[in-house]
Image (cartoon, rainbow, N blue to C red):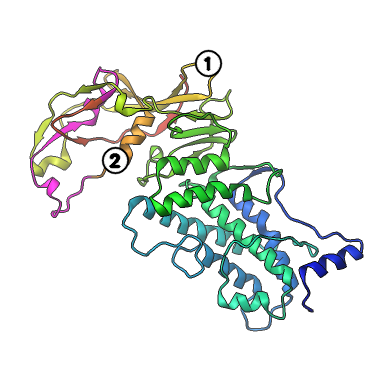
Amino acid sequence: MSTQTAGSSSHRLAGLGILPHTWSLRSGVYTPRELVDGFAPLLETVVHHLGEDSANTISARASLLNNVASNLATHTRESTLPFHNDVPDLSRREMKEQAERIGRTLVNWARDASKGPFEPSLNIRSPCENHLLTPVNVDLMFGKRSQPHLMQLFNEYMHQMVLLRDALLPFRNFDEVLVPIDGKGTRGIRDLEPARERFLTTLITKSATQSSVLDLAKTLLAPILPQTDTGGYGFQYEHGCILPSFLSGGDTHFHLLEYIPTKIEPLQQDVLFEYEFPDYYAAPRSEISVGSLVQPGHLLSFPSDSPSPIVQKASVASSSSAPSTSIFQLKLQLELNNGKRLGVDIGQIARGHRYAYQAHTDKSTDVLNQNAIVQSSLDILLQPEWGLITARQGAFMSSRPCSQLSLSQS
């Protein structure tokens, strides 16, 4: 197959009355796997033009997908989001593990797909994004089998996969998220580039924050949301809700969010979930009663097995300060077996969760080798005062598991 420039290819096609085709995504709602399938014509067209593979060699398609896998890894020369092997910062480590998990999944989806559609006359210009080729693919893309415009197509494929990986970083269940694409903006999902750059700048120069993770999720799913000073901690859009992932139970995550395929406010479309106390320094505070002095050997078993109220039902309810607003607050409502009910702002729970840690029995941990004042979380929740609870003496907090959360309205 002769080598020719992208310009001469376009001129030849036009001379035959065939205009070179461009590529983008049609308007619609996509799962991440469907987006990978939507990117496939870029790759498959390259593979088509490279022609048949020699016997006993790795196929061009497999070799190019190996390159993408290297781009999406976090430890390779070709990595687009490199991390050191030892990442002590918890938020960065969470993003590193998330990037690796998403990257492997995207490439596996692309590998599992049978050879998809291609467009022989596909010919686009793709800005250089500094995505590196592995040595074997340098030979493939610039050797005798290739044509100049194929590098443009493959560059665009690499970039779309990188953009998708990074856009999905906020979501624990990233494979379930429904992504709206309007098809009227920039090519593919390139409209996410500014938000991606802001997020990665924060991640690399500082660390991931809850607001930076949420802002990236908003850009992907609900770019038009009410603005507040805090930015909120979750939101609802046309195809579901986004809330901190720890609410769903299971593994404890630091900053990750959860896609929930339901609406809390069915009559609203884009809704921001805001903290009850946007400025928690100014929130009213009350002192909790003196806790229990517990010896080291009993810390992990506090409270004792003596009868105490048990959570029978847990649900999430919404409220708004004005009927017309798109800013809502969510409360975790608990019903106890003694008939009492209580509610706590989920925004405050989310804030507290990021500063909590799990006690463990490591003998090297001094904190478990001394007497401590311990408060039962249920006692704290049953305090009658409105606002935040403080403990001047300091305290551990002991909790018991509650039932699965359900969503409801108030």
**Magenta segment: does it hold 385?**
yes
* Marker count (numbered): 2
Q: Which mark is residue 323?
A: 1
Instruction: Report the quarter where the N terminus lies.
Output: bottom right
**Structural crowding at the residue carrying mark 2, measured as other residues with C-alpha within 10 Å and reported as few (<14), some (14–19) or many (≥20):** few
Give whichever of 307, 245 is nearer the camera. Answer: 245
Q: At x 67% / y 54%, what residue is drawn?
A: 38
Residue 1 shown left or right of residue 342 in the figure: right
Range drawn in magenta: 359-388
Label 1 and label 2: CA atoms lie apart by 34 Å
Pointer 2 residue: 355
Give the structural element (helix, strand or loop) at label 2: helix
x, y percent for residue 237: 56, 33
Residue 181: x percent and y percent?
65, 43
Kind of residue at disc 2: Tyr
Question: Can the viewer see residue 7 in this picture?
Answer: yes
Residue 232: give x, y in percent of width and height: 44, 32
Q: Earlier in the sequence, mark 1 or mark 2?
A: 1
Amino acid type of the residue that numbered disc 1 sits on in the rendered structure: Pro
Q: Nearer the viewer, residue 312 or 277?
A: 277
Q: Quadrant of residue 124?
A: bottom right
Which image quarter holds the C terminus? top left
